[in-house]
Image: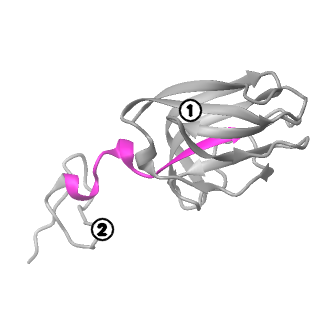
Amino acid sequence: MADLYLHPDGDALLVTTAGELTADPNCCCGSEELEGFVAIAVCNTNQRKDDNFSVRLNGTELGTVDNNQHACTGRIFATSDNITDFAGLPCHDAFEPTVLIQETAFLTGTNTLRIESIQNNGNNNLGGIMVVRLVWSGTQWEITKTYLNDDYFFPSGVGLGEDFEFDYP
């Protein structure tokens, strides 16, 4: 008869991604802190036209956000392109398609996220920015860890922007 291997923190069976039972608690459970996917959301929460933005993580451009309309514009940059919305996201009605990024873009320790105007739409800039870790609950993406949850606010003008620092993981 085969032995059952239980997780040391509870009664869950330890099963590898290959479907095999194991006694190694680090094989499949790993760190709960690193389960799921990471998402960066830039969200024009006041639904008033903002400038168009470039979004950079640690100096590397991830993509752009087109805010040239009075709507809840924005974009998600995530380690899974299946993430188009998640619990806690203020709005997403007029979001552009999700941009797939690699988790290796995040540094261990302090990271800098910059949003910068690349087109002046003449209406100043106000919205929200989030960096979160998500897991699929079976019905929606749920936040398991919040690295950053802040507002951006800066005047219109090409080259103007704001930097946000957060620790990872």
Return the mark for residue 113. 1
Residue 53 located within the stretch drawn in magenta: no
Tell me: 98 left or right of 147: right
Instruction: Indicate whether 45 appears above or below 11.
Output: above
N-term mark: 1 or 2? 2
Tell me: 99 left or right of 137: right
Q: Say which residue appears at 46% left-offset and 52% top-offset.
A: 102
Q: Say which residue appears at 8% left-offset and 78% top-offset.
A: 1
The residues bearing labels 1 and 2 have C-alpha atoms spaced at a distance of 33 Å
Say which of 1 and 98 sits in front: 98
Secondary structure under the numbered disc 1 in the rendered image: strand
- Residue 134 place in picture, x, y as percent: 51, 48
Q: Which residues are magenta?
A: 26-42
Secondary structure under the numbered disc 2 in the rendered image: loop
Q: Quadrant of residue 105?
A: top left
Return the mark for residue 103. none
Q: Quadrant of residue 42?
A: top right
Residue pushed farthest left? 1
Q: Which quarter shows the C terminus?
A: top left
- Residue 64 place in picture, x, y as percent: 69, 46
Read off the residue under disc 2.
Answer: 17
